[in-house]
Amino acid sequence: MRKTILLAVIVIVFIAGVWYAYNKNLSEKNVIKIGVISPITGNASSYGDPAAKAIILAAEEINSKGGINGKKIKLIIEDGKCDAKEAVNAVNKLINIDGVKIILGGHCSSESLAIAPIVNEKRVLQLATITSSNKYTQAGDYSFRNWPSSDYYVGKLGDVAYQYGARKIAVLYEQKDFPVAVVDSFSKTFTKNGGEIILQQSFGSSENDFRSYLTKIKQKGNQVDSLLFASQAENSAISFFKNLKELGMINQYKLFGNDVVALKKVFDETGGLNKNVITTDTYVNPENPFTKQMLEKYKEKYGEYPQTNYFYVASSYDGLMLIKDAILFCNSEEDIECLKNFLYNTKNWIGASGKITFDENGDAITQVGIHYFDDNGNEIWKEF
């Protein structure tokens, strides 16, 4: 516990230091304030922290070229902790105290869904860069995301699982907005194909021992041929695979999951137990010139490439670049109606995360791929 607390403090201090170094020369005058809500600490910090760093990187790049219409970007970053209450506190501070009119975030569905009613009531522009819950599609006229809905990219996993021979599946998922949406989207497609959900169990975010849940699945015998696991972050996936092995279940089923099951950290910390576990995930080609340039700048600034799915970082970087283009088009950061309409009309915008188009609900249509590690531990992407 003391190690966990110490690590959280180190992460907060580091990101605060980066943010302070970036903001220290910016006065309150002649700046454009942009709020950021991201899980800097907690389980989701594995992608929330790199996402915030990517936004800082984008802001520095914009400011180094003179800013936007002669104004420098000033970021105000809040730790939403992937928690609804924390995100609400953060958005109220940003709007009511800091006077922010544009917010990037949340960087998880629980944050984004919690703050959406507030930004829409206040007519503040929200661009969520890591949010997939299908509920967010109807979040409001001022809520956008440059990340696909779970219905769009997780729904494809229902097709893939059926194609890979899954017919009777047991589901284990975390009670958070993202995993809940994963199960909902997967189930609709899988059952439409003719598959059957045999058993569905949920667990709390504080749980890290899944043996009792897995034992119930094991007791179903040959009634179950496949498993779907969905959690908010990779720590739960690591425990899940270790428990599967302990119970002798690792090779008994076809295994599928949301994007956390195919993270490199899960592979490394389980000794490759997640080999051939299939997911569908947001995909970006690291050899794309825009992506490659962003990744090299990230490495130069932070000393390493992002230790997460590159799309998480690229979409966050692109979020601020999209806002920059919107402000330039509208010739104002204050005209929220114009900024909103710019996003609605954005088609085939190209950035570090690839090509982005917003639909009539403010949802993004982006690249998606099948993602897994093969028998030799190679990370495999197959773009749809």
Image (cartoon, helix red, strand yellow):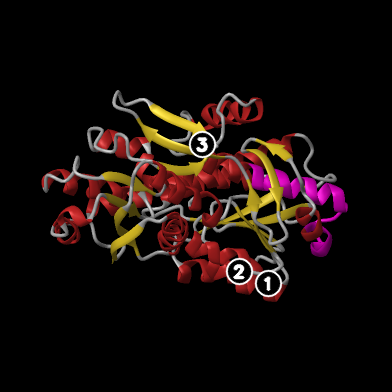
Badge 3 crowding class, 10 Å Cα cut-off, few under 14, some 14 to 19, many 20 or more, is many
Per the model, the C-alpha gap separating discs 3 and 2 is 26 Å
- The three-letter amino acid code for the residue at tag 1 is Asn
- Report helix, strand or loop for mark 2: helix
Residue located beneath label 3 in the image: 310
Residue located beneath label 1 in the image: 120
- Report helix, strand or loop for mark 3: helix
- The three-letter amino acid code for the residue at tag 3 is Tyr
Identify whether 165 is placed above or below 209: above
Of callouts 1 and 3, the N-terminal one: 1
Badge 1 crowding class, 10 Å Cα cut-off, few under 14, some 14 to 19, many 20 or more, is some
Please give the name of the residue rendered at 31% of the width and 58% of the height, measured from the top-left corner: 171
Identify whether 177 is placed above or below 251: below
Q: Quadrant of the N terminus?
A: bottom left
For this view, does 15 lie left or right of residue 357? left
Q: Quadrant of the C terminus?
A: top right
Q: Which residues are magenta?
A: 318-339
Please give the name of the residue rendered at 30% of the width and 23% of the height, measured from the top-left corner: 376
Residue 116 - label: 2
Identify whether 268 is placed above or below 99: above
Per the model, the C-alpha gap separating discs 1 and 2 is 6 Å
